[in-house]
Image (spheres, rainbow, N blue to C red):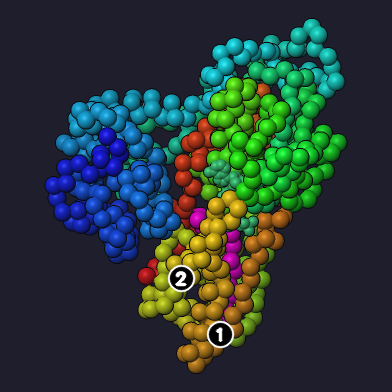
Amino acid sequence: MSSAAVLTRNQNLPFQHCFFVFFFSQTHRPKLIFPAITLHFPSVFNCETMGSLSPSINPRLVLQANSYDPLSFRRVFGASLTGQPARPDMTAVCKRSRRIVYAKKNSDEDIANCDPEWKSKFKEDFEKRFNIPHISDFFPDAAPYPSTFCLSMRTPVNEEFAEGYPSDEEWYGYINNDDRVLLKVIRYSSRSSAGAECIDPDCSWVEQWIHRAGPREKIYFKPENVKAAIVTCGGLCPGLNDVIRQIVITLEIYGVKKIVGIPFGYRGFGKDIAEIPLSRKVVQNVHLSGGSLLGVSRGGPTLDEIDREINMLFVLGGNGTHAGANSIHNECIKRGLKVAVVGVPKTIDNDILHMDKTFGFDTAVEEAQRAINAAYIEAHSAYRGIGIVKLMGRSSGFIAMQASLASGQIDICLIPEVPFELHGSHGVLNHLNYLLKTKGSAVICVAEGAGQSFLEKTNAKDASGNVVLGDIGVHIQHEVKKYFKEMGNSADVKYIDPTYMIRACRANASDGILCTVLGQNAVHGAFAGYSGITVGICNNHYVYLPITEVISYPKIVDQNSRMWHRCLTSTGQPDFF
Ligand SMILES: Nc1ncnc2c1ncn2[C@@H]1O[C@H](COP(=O)(O)OP(=O)(O)OP(=O)(O)O)[C@@H](O)[C@H]1O
Ligand SMILES: O=P(O)(O)OC[C@H]1O[C@](O)(CO)[C@@H](O)[C@@H]1O
Ligand SMILES: [Mg+2]
């Protein structure tokens, strides 16, 4: 039975009625969501599933159940649906208590009955999903050695290990393989609590443990046999050089001598493209500038075309890059190659699941302040001045939201997750008119992925297959000018697009620290024998996550989260629809 089939069972009540009830209780914006859902979910949900359609439901489940545009889905639902993911193949609603039952698909009986054991089943399932793949899972003959990483001994790089690797039994600096970090630290008492992420309708608390990152006492690669490679993919991001530098330094501390960079992202895996030799000497000062020492790109060769003698691969990139890394990990297993593939999430958009933040994001927010402040000064100093700043964020408005919050100078923040109208009595333009009358000036911060429905679709895609977005900043500028001109009372509009200036910056201090820790942990993870994993920070602790879990869908701003509410409090903006 597919998850779609689970969802469509027992259609015994008119579904529109059900939607109405559900969304009035779940969101402040039933007006908007109601028609949009009607549009996108013609027959999938019914009352029997309503109990499970809580903010906890996983978009994957819905995406799988019904084919429709994921962007519209995100725009409509926001992240009120991005809470604790439920597994598409493991979820059903108990008919009697409306409790979600975690039962394996293909098991009608389990799904139909309430399962008092659902919590333990959920935990068990969660543990499996968040288990981090280890090379010994695929190569049972993989042998462990005592780690060469021990700060109290500081093994010289060029030492020969004829007598075996030195190990300091007394050093308590290693992470135990069974150490765990809590993924969720808030216990919500009800689904109506702001930003609640619930697994079941009662918002029951279930512990969700993920693996702690750091050096292990046993390693699965002999340093002298290692050839490690680093590749940076996708767009630029502050901190790439910091991570490269730290990976190289940590590899050398383990005793690795063969370290190379793959130039220009996955493209560098193409035939006849020379690797870049890396050493501490080469990377010593690279973090002092932005960009990537190795270069970046989108697109690249297919898996069949990749043929390198590498046994550790460090992949720095976003969702797309991680999908690629996971394919490489699987391909290595298929080819019988003992290779550790470890990701370091890189995206200023901050759209990677389960992480407090990704490196470069803090720097982007900080750098955006300069643009926002300039827009504010321009607007404030002009007669009827309006400043518009466009910030990056393809499908997630985190930079725009946080930059607006940080600046305190933004009157209107527009992000892809929250729909808005430009025209009409509830539109942005009408509010701008109000702001000009009451304040004399106004500043808008818009994320690049916002308002794409107002722009002509070109169907153009970049080399990675990402949709090429229209310029919402230019569009808003044009519409604002036109609106006030037609009104006969022009506004002085200044538009700033600092996007690439922000992305090319060097990392600030807090990102510098994050990059350093992530880079080190990536190397520890690879030496510990994990592959198909990525590193991250979760609730201020450093963790390893299986790539499959972090790429299930992009993280987006939850419009029912406290952070978005805080942003609205700060800007004072109304709903624009
Ligand atoms: N599903 C996929 N499977 C395999 N490789 C992929 C996949 N999606 C993207 N890639 C490859 O990963 C690399 C980076 O992808 P992409 O351009 O989407 O950037 P990204 O990693 O998502 O980072 P950014 O946040 O900058 O967009 C490209 O070389 C692309 O070809
Ligand atoms: O112009 P490029 O290099 O494709 O990058 C643009 C994209 O990069 C990102 O910053 C992600 O890295 C997105 O916000 C943006 O859409
Ligand atoms: Mg991407």
User: Which label sits on residue 181?
Assistant: none
For badge 2, the amino acid type reads Phe
Percent position of residue 501, x then y:
70, 61
For badge 1, the amino acid type reads Ala
In the rendered image, which quarter contains the C terminus? bottom left
User: Which label sits on residue 454?
Assistant: 2
Q: Is mark 1 on a helix, strand or loop?
A: loop
Above or below for 391 versus 305 = below
Frontmost residue, 67 versus 111: 67
In the rendered image, which quarter contains the N terminus? top left
Q: Which residue is drawn at 35% across and 38% down?
A: 88
Tell me whether circle 2 and circle 1 mark residues in contact (CB < 8 Å): no
What residue occupies the far bottom of the structure in this picture?
A: 488
Q: Give the range drawn in magenta.
A: 384-397
Q: Which residue is drawn at 63% across and 50% down?
A: 298
The tag earlier along the polypeptide, 2 or 1, is: 2
Q: CB of residue at label 2: within 8 Å of ligand 2? A: no
Above or below for 180 versus 446 = above
Q: Indicate the quadrant where residue 492 lies.
A: bottom right
User: Which label sits on residue 491?
Assistant: 1
Frontmost residue, 407 versus 25: 25
* Residue 437 painted magenta: no
Q: Which residue is drawn at 28% across and 63% down?
A: 35
Left or right: where 98 falls relative to 166: left
Percent position of residue 137, x then y:
53, 19
Above or below for 199 versus 43 = above
Left or right: where 131 falls relative to 217: left
Q: What element carries label 2?
A: helix
Percent position of residue 353, x then y:
50, 43
Crowd rating for badge 1 (residues with CA inside 10 Å; few <14, some 14–19, many 20+): many
